[in-house]
Amino acid sequence: MTTALITHKACYDHVTPPGHPEQVARLDAVLGALEGLDLVSVSAPMAADDDLLRCHPQAHLNAVRDAAPADGWRSLDADTHMSVGTLEAAYRAAGGVVKAVDLVMSGEVGNAFAAVRPPGHHAERETPMGFCFFGSVAVAAKHAMEFHGLKRVAIVDFDVHHGNGTQDLVEEDARVLFFSSHQMPLWPGTGAAHETGVGNIVNIPLPEGCSSKVFRDAYTREVFPRLAAFKPELLLISAGFDAHAADPLAGMMLQDDDFAWVTQKLCDVADEHCGGRVVSALEGGYDLEALGRSARAHVKVLKERAR
Ligand SMILES: [Zn+2]
């Protein structure tokens, strides 16, 4: 069994203004770092509107489509900008994660990593924000339930920022158990432990300067037991690598090896409860070298554990 690598050249056509951290070069850093891992390359299709509509109202789809510029940029907020190629890239980012679910559910691959951008975990029902337009991982979770008939899907988001968008999209859906670990205080400011949805949201705020030990202890105490008790039928990962010590946007102190460690532990739960079915999608990570090394550490484990 093997690991699918899902991406699309259109993800390079989402161009952000000069100096923006969520830059085209991130995708090169990730894909370059994954070379030699013997992954099955798959082209990311455009998401179907029907898939997006499980998370976002038609008005949101229309607003994003109408905001797409004919040239230059259109800024939706101070951080979130659309270039000519952004609309297609956002559709392929969401479609790529949905495709990853299809490949894993059909058993064509053991697990999958979607190296796509723009990221998705900050996009709320009707609000693009934080470099995100559509909630790709939440869209894929709903697809897994509505199309593949799953009853329990877990999402683990270890990006350094709170997955406010994913939380907004799943917080009323008890079929989804969502974990977000993140530095707090930090943008976007949400993600306190008392935000629990319908009992399906687990927020794990971590301090600035958070060490590998504090991170691992938090996951050992708050994520793995609860995840195992939920017995997910599919595990989705919002893989942001910006909790790395080298990242310029945050102040956590993780090292490359921490991403391998958390991936191993998540694969342990997936092996126990869902036949190893794991779908991971790129979120943040803004130091290009640390991003590449961390993504490689993460995907290398997925490849080793694919069954
Ligand atoms: Zn982030």
Image (cartoon, rainbow, N blue to C red):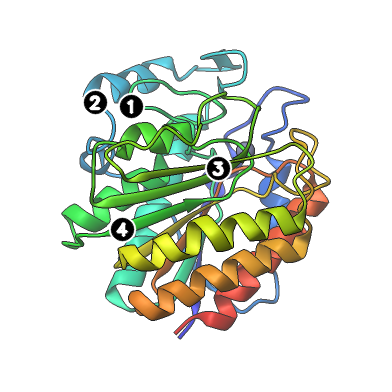
Residue 153 - label: 4
Q: Earlier in the sequence, mark 1 or mark 3?
A: 3
Residue 102 - label: none
Q: Amino acid at mark 3?
A: Arg
Residues under numbered marks 2 and 4 in contact, where contact means CB atoms less than 8 Å apart: no
Q: Earlier in the sequence, mark 1 or mark 4?
A: 1
Give the quarter of the image for residue 161: top right
Q: Nearer the viewer, residue 159 or 202?
A: 202
Residue 87 visible in the current orientation: yes
Residue 31 visible in the current orientation: no
What separation in Å lies between label 1 and label 4 (alpha carbons)? Answer: 19 Å
Q: Residues within 10 Å of mark 1 (few under 14, many from 20)?
A: many
- What residue is shown at x 36% (from left), y 59% (from top)? 99
Residue 57 - label: 2
| Disc 1 target residue | 125
Q: Amino acid at mark 4?
A: Val
Q: Amino acid at mark 1?
A: Arg
What separation in Å lies between label 1 and label 3 (alpha carbons)? Answer: 19 Å
Q: Residue 46, relative to residue 131: is it above or below?
A: below
What separation in Å lies between label 2 and label 4 (alpha carbons)? Answer: 22 Å
Q: Nearer the viewer, residue 49 or 266?
A: 266
Q: Secondary structure at mark 4?
A: strand
Q: Earlier in the sequence, mark 2 or mark 4?
A: 2
- For the residues carrying marks 3 and 2, which lies nearer the camera in this image? 2
| Disc 3 target residue | 117
Q: Amino acid at mark 2?
A: Pro
Q: Describe residue 241's horizontal placement relative to residue 229 as left or right.
A: right
Q: Residues within 10 Å of mark 2 (few under 14, many from 20)?
A: few
- The answer to whether mark 4 is within 8 Å of ligand 1 is no
Ligand 1 shows up in the quarter that is top right
